Image: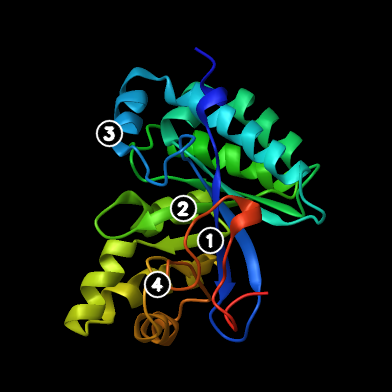
């Protein structure tokens, strides 16, 4: 089965927490005609290893989508740690091809599969840096390894993304310290902090107040095909 035929990437902007303007657009996996993410399928694909085929196909579809635009944009693409363990060279080939049509490519390593070899991931990050491709660790929250100083110090990503569920819990409880732990971890390696699940101006201000440099969420813009994005006025340009 050619899975690429069924993929229709949606995009969501990542904006600066202070001032206006978009920094990048995250490409999110969607099946054609759907606006939700089939996480149960991704877990199955990760277990079987088929996720490597899907992740590579997704990058190609993002490449196609960007070729249909007038400008060059920074774009983030998600990749499973399972893909990077099984097919690092194949995936690297796809993102370097994407980099030719993007202002910047950001590879977001998802938290859904354990990193089996941190040294190998660090080597992949170094290869990306050599080609001016950035790397982010997605959905960072304790006690996940993405929030361990030894791990982040070895891998040295450009971005740490605060887990949206963690942000939501802290916002409701008025608890800032768990978020500041992620911010301190990022600062120690010179990484930029992105907060997800921003669904209200109050949560936007809360995330910015704990040190998030960038923000992402439905309050700013709901994921959509690139040409159909509707961004809240004043939040991105």
Give the CA separation, mark 2 to mark 3: 21 Å
Closer to the eye: label 2 or 4: 4
Mark 4 closeness class: few <14, some 14–19, many ≥20 residues within 10 Å: many
Q: Earlier in the sequence, mark 4 or mark 1?
A: 1
SS at mark 4? loop
- Are the residues tagged 4 and 3 within 8 Å (C-beta)? no
Mark 2 closeness class: few <14, some 14–19, many ≥20 residues within 10 Å: many
Residue 159, which numbered label? 1
Closer to the eye: label 2 or 3: 3
Give the CA separation, mark 4 to mark 3: 24 Å
In the rendered view, tell whether residue 52 sits above or below residue 76: above
Q: Nearer the viewer, residue 159 or 50?
A: 50
Seen as rendered, the residue at the extreme top is 1
Give the CA separation, mark 4 to mark 1: 17 Å
- Are the residues tagged 2 and 3 within 8 Å (C-beta)? no
Q: Earlier in the sequence, mark 2 or mark 4?
A: 2
- Are the residues tagged 2 and 1 within 8 Å (C-beta)? yes
In the rendered view, tell whether residue 222 sits above or below residue 206: above
Q: Nearer the viewer, residue 128 or 34?
A: 34
Give the CA separation, mark 1 to mark 3: 26 Å
Q: Earlier in the sequence, mark 2 or mark 3?
A: 3
Residue behind mark 2: 137
Mark 1 closeness class: few <14, some 14–19, many ≥20 residues within 10 Å: many
SS at mark 1? strand
SS at mark 3? helix
The quarter of the displayed image where residue 172 is located:
bottom left
Residue behind mark 3: 40
Residue drawn at (51%, 27%), measured in percent from left and top? 6
In percent of width and height, residue 102 lies at 75, 49
């Amino acid at each position: 089965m050619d899975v690429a035929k069924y993929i229709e990437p949606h995009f969501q902007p990542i904006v600066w927490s202070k001032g206006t303007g978009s920094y990048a657009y995250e490409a999110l996996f969607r099946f054609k005609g759907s606006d939700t993410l089939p996480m149960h399928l991704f877990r199955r694909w990760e277990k079987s290893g088929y996720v490597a085929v899907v992740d590579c196909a997704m990058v190609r579809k993002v490449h196609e989508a960007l070729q249909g635009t007038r400008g060059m944009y920074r774009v983030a693409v998600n990749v499973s740690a399972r893909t990077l363990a099984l097919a690092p060279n194949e995936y690297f080939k796809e993102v370097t091809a994407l980099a030719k049509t993007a202002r910047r490519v950001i590879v977001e390593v998802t938290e859904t599969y354990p990193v089996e070899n941190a040294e190998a991931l660090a080597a992949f990050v170094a290869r990306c840096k050599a080609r001016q491709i950035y790397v982010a660790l997605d959905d960072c929250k304790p006690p996940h390894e993405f929030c361990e100083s030894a791990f982040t110090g070895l891998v040295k990503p450009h971005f740490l993304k605060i887990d949206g569920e963690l942000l939501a819990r802290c916002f409701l409880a008025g608890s800032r310290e768990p978020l500041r732990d992620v911010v301190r971890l990022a600062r120690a390696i010179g990484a930029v902090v992105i907060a997800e699940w921003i669904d209200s101006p109050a949560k936007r201000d809360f995330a910015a107040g704990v040190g998030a440099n960038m923000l992402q969420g439905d309050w700013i813009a709901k994921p959509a095909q690139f040409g159909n994005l509707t961004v809240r006025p004043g939040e991105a340009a």
